[in-house]
Amino acid sequence: MSTLAIPAKVPSPRDDARSLHDAFKGLRCDNSAVISILAHRNSAQIERIQESYDNKYPEELRKRVSSELHGHFKKAVLLWLREPMVRNANILKHALRDTVQNLKVASDVICSSTPSQLRKLKQVYQSSYGAPVEQDIENATHGDHKKLLLAYINTTRYEGPEIDETQILNDANAIKRGENVFIQIFSERSAAHLFAVNNVYSGMYGPLEKAIKKDRSENFGYALLAILRFVENPAKYFARVLRKAMKGLGTHDSSLIWVIVTRAEIDLQYIKEEYKRKYGKSLSSAVSSEISGHYRSFLLALLGPKRID
């Protein structure tokens, strides 16, 4: 469910392009005007605004935004200007760097995608960056984490609701016996199957998350948990990612921007509801207290009016 507050009467793309051009004039960019336009248009409207702007003015809108805005505000707006299917590819490209936190973002992007979404992601990644995503995964990751991500992104999994109860019990028992089956089960089984395995395992042996956390490398365990938590409840999963991005000292802005920008037109309202239910505080309030300036204003605008929080 989209959280975008789009005005009842939207100006034409040509008028929006002109208003943006006016906002860029002078010694300082009118950042508030940029937010009032771009944060209140959906992706189809954004695409038409960019076409109009690029046809009328000598410098492309994306290049002008890049030169006028700064910091995380610029990063968030530039991601928002991309086509929806390109956003995850862009985040993934920047996340595939060999640091623990960046690789967690890479795991989140991959492990919260369905098989059909991953097929599209691979195509977009190849066309955008001239190399297969598998190549960057190979270079940035290690060990079982690498094996899991490569298997997960390349395996054709069933996306329907039917399950095999015998196979579910076999998988639960194999995990309990300590067999080396996590990569196979988590990369080959459907979401419905994993959901059932989690329930069966938890009922027989205790939380499956506890078994995952035992003796697993940090990045490998994180990716397994991401797959499991997304299967259980996508909105709750994203609420958890946001909470961790804002918890403790500092903010992990890549995670914060990724979730809010890429989910704004999909299920951000449900994520907001889960966040409030789980943490007792509205997501808008959490974001407002964590970041500042036009960066904060832009993300809050994508989150929508406070009354629906």
Image (cartoon, helix red, strand yellow):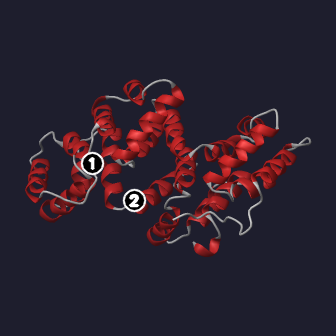
Q: Is residue 293 visible to us here? A: no
- The image quarter containing residue 289 is bottom right
Q: Amino acid at mark 1?
A: Lys
Local crowd size for mark 1, using a 10 Å CA cut-off: few (<14), some (14–19), many (≥20): some
As drawn, is 176 to the left or to the right of 243? left
Residue at label 2? 234
Q: Which of the image's four quarters has the C terminus?
A: bottom right
- Residue drawn at point x = 81 percent, y = 54 percent: 33
Among all residues in the image, which is located at the extreme right?
26
Residue 63 rendering spot, x and y as whole percentages:
73, 34
Q: Contact (CB < 8 A) between labels 2 and 1?
A: no
The amino acid marked with disc number 2 is Pro
Residue 161 to residue 52: above or below: below
- Give the SS element for disc 2: helix
Identify the residue at horizontal 24%, vertical 46% (top origin).
186
Location of mark 1 (residue): 213
- Occupied quadrant, residue 161: bottom left
Task: Find residue 24 and report its horizontal and vertical position in percent.
Answer: 84, 43
